[in-house]
Amino acid sequence: MTKQEFLKYCFNTYGTSPDYPFDEDFETAVLRHADNRKWYALVMRVSRRKFGFDSDEVIDVVNLKLPTEMFGSFGATDGVYPAYHMNKLHWVSVLLPDAPDDVVQFLVNVSFEATKDKRKRQNCEPMGRLKKPYTTRLFEVFKRVKSSLGGSIFDTNRNEISACKT
């Protein structure tokens, strides 16, 4: 997924446009909730070397916030690493050129829900259907995260993700 595709997905899904809050840096974009202004994604250009690669190639990376229960569920094979330049207990870095599109979309959906105004979480809509091959693996992750969000986040009958209380 490219940076432009990622930003288009966020605009089409959440209606949010990138914000460029850093002086003289027009490449690093922040995506925020309109109501509480919390960040749910930070898009920046970072050298692969920062993630342990033997390369100085600069790529697009997105930092996303995840519930702590989800850490360890994704790894380098998914293009997901401990967050660069953010709190590694709450954020991950997703290398956009390396991560499958459905993993990126799933993780940004989780990040959006994790940073949402807590009062609005109870009246939310399902985030969408999962696509294979990640359905089985993500279902296992959902079962572990379920209690931390206060309700079911996976409807096995409809194969949908949702952060709504049941």
Image: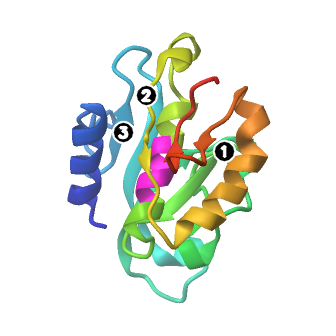
- Sequence order check: which comes first, mark 3 or mark 2? 3
**Residue 53 visible somewhere in the drawing:** yes
Q: Which residue is mark 3?
A: 30
Left or right placement of residue 68 versus residue 22 in this view:
right
Alpha carbon distance from label 1 to label 3: 16 Å
Dominant SS type (magenta): helix
Residue range highlighted in magenta: 104-109
Badge 3 amino acid: Val
Find residue 87 and name its label: 1
- In the rendered picture of this protein, how many numbered marks are placed on residues? 3
Badge 2 amino acid: Glu
Alpha carbon distance from label 3 to label 2: 24 Å
- Nearer the observer, 154 or 9: 154
| Figure quadrant of residue 14 | top left
- Nearer the observer, 47 or 68: 68
Q: Position of residue 127 (x, y in %)?
A: 43, 39
Q: Position of residue 140 (x, y in %)?
A: 72, 58
